[in-house]
């Protein structure tokens, strides 16, 4: 029988006839598990433009084209700024391209769950590459953390997320589709209030009000929408310093989702030894980003 030996950074193969061959471990791993483009049985929800995975984290990038939305917006005479007692009204405003980064995590058995780290951004053109620029969304409930280090740049408040829906299904296909539906419904349909201003410091609506007089109040936004729904493609929205790929890389870093380092035989052995339990640092990070409470 052929014999394969992994020692240090080299892989050695010995044939029954005594023929010996060697190659670097990194090159061998690249041949064993080459990069591939494959949704692995997931039927992509309408609007999904990109899926990127690293470690136990998967980011699903969803795009909604410019359109007029009917939103539940906090009323000017609301007795409460957020939570019980908040009074809402219906507003009809145009939004540019709406980009949602739905962040999923996987447990050691590979089951997907929507995490509490999803983000939202604006664009004035459709996504065509990972280098695409992003703008902060002028929306209540999209939070600005100060300082931003270790936090999402434009966090979607998930207080009203339909949590029972995000774990629906036994397959990755079912969980991604149900998670996306629940997240988009939470963002656009559950009501915009001043929760971000009270809990995270500010919302990107509050931060964006000075960029253009047509969106400095929701009343002006409605009036501008009636005149020209596509005006939102001309507004100088606040720019994000990171590209789409940069924001995704930042998410992976925040969630300690780096790929395993496989450079030598010891690294491969560690995968076997750790197969029954997560390392302490990984376990803490995993519990943090899967926490939906």
Image: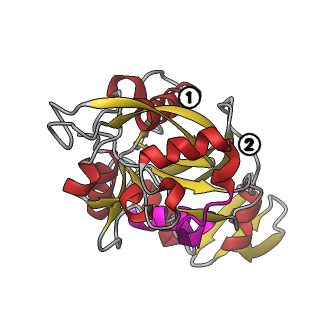
Residue placed under numbered mark 2 in the picture: 38
4 part of magenta stretch: no
Give the magenta part as a residue range.
234-254
Q: Can residue 11 be seen in this view?
A: no
Q: In which quarter of the image is the C terminus?
A: top left
Q: In the image, is residue 104 above or below residue 19? A: above
Front tag of 1 and 2: 1
Q: As rendered, which of 89 and 179 lies closer to the eye?
A: 89
Label 1 vs label 2: CA separation? Answer: 17 Å
Residue 33 visible in the picture:
yes
> What crowding class fits label 2: few (fewer than 14 Cα within 10 Å), some (14-19), or many (20 or more)?
few
Q: Tell me the quarter of the picture where residue 67 sits.
A: top right
In the depicted structure, whether residue 202 falls above or below residue 287: below
* Picture coordinates of residue 194, whole percent (x, y): 26, 48
**Mark closest to the chain's N terminus, 1 or 2:** 2
| Contact (Cβ within 8 Å) of mark 1 with mark 2 | no
> x, y (%) of residue 64?
64, 40
Which of 203/127 is in front? Answer: 203
**Mark 1 crowdedness (10 Å alpha carbons): few <14, some 14-19, many ≥20:** some
> Camera-side residue: 94 or 150?
94
Q: Where is residue 233 in the image (x, y as percent from the top left)?
A: 68, 55
The spot of residue 22 in percent (x, y) is: 76, 75
Secondary structure beneath dot 1 equals: helix
Q: Mark 1 points at which residue?
A: 177
| Quadrant assignment, res 69 | top right
**Badge 2 element:** loop
- Side (left or right) of 1 relative to 134: right
x 15%, y 31%: residue = 84
């Amino acid at each position: 029988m052929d014999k394969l030996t992994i020692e240090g950074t080299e892989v050695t193969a010995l044939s029954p006839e005594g023929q010996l061959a060697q190659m670097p471990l990194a090159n061998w791993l690249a041949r064993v598990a080459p990069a591939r483009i494959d949704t692995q049985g997931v039927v992509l929800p309408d609007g999904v433009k990109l899926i990127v995975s690293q470690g136990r984290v998967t980011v699903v990038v969803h795009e909604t084209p410019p359109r007029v939305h009917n939103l539940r917006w906090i009323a000017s005479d609301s007795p409460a700024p957020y939570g019980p007692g908040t009074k809402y009204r219906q507003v009809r405003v145009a939004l540019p391209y709406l980009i949602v980064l739905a962040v999923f995590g996987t447990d050691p058995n590979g089951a997907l769950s929507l995490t509490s780290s999803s983000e939202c951004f604006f664009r004035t053109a459709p996504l065509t590459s990972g280098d695409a620029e992003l703008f902060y969304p002028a929306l209540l409930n999209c939070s600005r953390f100060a300082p931003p280090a270790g936090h999402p740049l434009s966090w979607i408040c998930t207080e009203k997320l339909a949590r029972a829906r995000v774990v629906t299904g036994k397959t990755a296909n079912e969980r991604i589709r149900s998670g996306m539906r629940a997240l988009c419904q939470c963002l656009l349909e559950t009501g915009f209030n001043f929760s971000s201003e009270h809990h995270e410091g500010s919302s990107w609506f509050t931060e964006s009000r000075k960029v253009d007089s047509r969106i400095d109040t929701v009343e002006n936004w409605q009036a501008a929408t009636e005149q020209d729904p596509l005006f939102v493609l001309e507004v100088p929205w606040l720019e994000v310093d990171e590209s789409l790929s940069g924001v995704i890389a930042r998410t992976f870093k925040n969630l300690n989702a780096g790929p395993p380092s496989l450079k030598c035989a010891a690294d491969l052995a560690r995968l076997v030894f750790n197969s029954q339990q997560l390392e302490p640092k990984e376990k803490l990070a995993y519990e943090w980003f899967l926490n939906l409470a």
